[in-house]
Amino acid sequence: METMTKNVSVEKSKTSKISEVDFNNLSFGSVYTDHMLVCDFVNGAWQTPKVVPYQPITLEPSAKIFHYGQSIFEGMKAYKDENGDAWLFRPLENFKRLNKSAKRLAIPELPEAYFMEGLTTLLQVEKDWIPQNPGSSLYVRPFILASGTGFHASPADEYKFIIACAPSGAYFSGKVKVLIEENYSRAANGGVGYAKAGGNYAGQFYPTQLAIEKGYNQVIWTDDNTHEYIEEAGAMNIFVRINDTLITGPTSDRILDGITRKSILEIAEDQGIATEVRKITVSEVVEAAKNGSLKEMFGAGTAAVVSPIAGFGYQGTDYELPELDNSYATQLKTYITDIQYNRTEDKFGWRYPVE
Ligand SMILES: *Cc1c(COP(=O)(O)O)cnc(C)c1O
C-alpha cells in the first residue's frame, strides 16, 4: 500500500504494536513506534524520503559507520495538548544543528524540505503514538550513518538518514550528584564537541562509569586544556546560579549549542532573571558553595528539560546545594514545558504544529 503525502511516500505497516504498549508505564526511549523515516544518499544525492514499517537495516561489514564512526544524531520531542493536537518545539533548530554536525563529520548536508516534510509526515502517521499523559512525549531521534563501504579511512559515498520514534514517560532523574572531572575530557579545541557525533558519547561512557563507581550519577565536564572551567553536565548544558544570577558557559568548539540552553536564556531574560553567558571557573563554584552564594546548578537538555543537581564532588570533597522552594530550575522548566504542551501563549514563536 503506497500513498503519497507531499513528496514523502508512506508504506503502512500491516500490524500495529501500539496495543502492547503500557502508556502509563513508559521508560525513556526503549519501545519504538510502527514506522520510521528512511532517506538514502546514493549517486551523489539525497533521494526522496519514505516512511516505512519500523524494521532492522542491513549493512555490509565494510560500512564506514563501523570503522570510522561517521554518524550524527539529533534528539527532539513531539507533544500532544489537551485537544489532541500535536506539536514540535523549534524543530528547525534541530535541522540546522544536524547539518552543522554533518558538515564537521564530512557527511553530505540534508535539504531542509527532506528533514521537515519527512519529520512531519512520519509524525502524522504515528500521531496515535504521541502520549497524552502528563509529562509524556514522543521522543524523536533523527540520525545519519555512513552506509557506504571501504576499509580506507575516507568519507563514505553512501549514507542513510533515518528518523525513529519512541514514546517516553516523564524523565525524572531525581536530584543528581555530580563529579567535577579533573582528568578526562569530552571535547577539545578544534574537535567535534559541538557536533552531536556518535563517538562523543562513546567517549563519555568510561569516565562516567568511573564516577558512578565512586557514588556519583554524572560527570561535569571541564575544559580539556586546564580543567579549570565548567563546561557541560553529562550530555546536557550546565547552568549555575550564584546569588540571583543565572550563568552558563559560552558555546564553543567544545560546548554543544543546546536548544534548551538558548530557550532557557531567553525565558530567563524575559522573566527578569539576571543572566550571564561567560566562562565559569571551578574555583568560583567551589568558593560560592563554601560561602553559601551557590544556590542552584542544573543540566539542560531536551530529554530531561532541566535536571537539578543536589551536590558535587571535587578533589575528594563533597559539596551540597541548598533545597530551594521556588527554584529557577522549577520555574524555567514549568515555563518551557507549558509552551511545549500548548498550555500557554507562545510569544517566542517556538511551537510548531504537526500537520
Ligand atoms: C544534545 C546535547 C545537549 C542539549 O541539547 P538540546 O538541544 O537542548 O537537547 C547538550 N549537551 C550535549 C553534549 C548534547 O549532546
Image: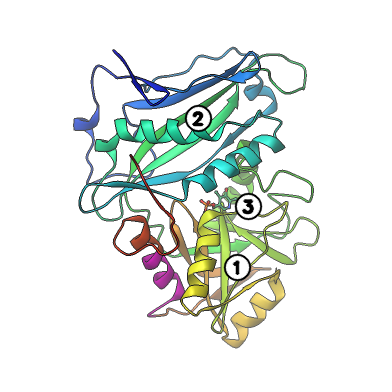
- Going by the numbered disc 3, the residue's amino acid type is Leu
Q: Which mark is residue 313?
A: 1
Residue pushed farthest bottom? 291
- Considering depth in this image, is 353 or 29 the residue closer to the camera? 353
In the rendered structure, which segment of residues is drawn in magenta?
325-335
Q: Residues within 10 Å of mark 1 (few under 14, many from 20)?
A: many
Residue 160 visible from this viewpoint: yes
* Mark 3 in CB contact with mark 1 (< 8 angstroms): no
Question: Mark 2 or mark 1, which is nearer to you?
Answer: 2
The x and y percentages for residue 65 are 63, 24
Q: Residues within 10 Å of mark 2 (few under 14, many from 20)?
A: many
Find the distance from the CA under tag 2 to the CA under tag 3: 24 Å
The residue labelled by disc 3 is 256
Q: Is mark 1 on a helix, strand or loop?
A: strand
Question: Mark 3 or mark 1, which is nearer to you?
Answer: 3
The residue labelled by disc 2 is 114
Q: How crowded is mark 3: few (under 14 residues within 10 Å), some or many (20 or more)?
A: many
Find the distance from the CA under tag 3 to the CA under tag 1: 23 Å
**Residue 20 relative to residue 181: left or right:** left
**Ligand 1 has an atom within 8 Å of the beta carbon of the residue at disc 3:** yes
Q: What element carries label 3?
A: loop
**Ligand 1 has an atom within 8 Å of the beta carbon of the residue at disc 1:** no
Quadrant in which residue 349 is drawn = bottom left
**Ligand 1 has an atom within 8 Å of the beta carbon of the residue at disc 2:** no
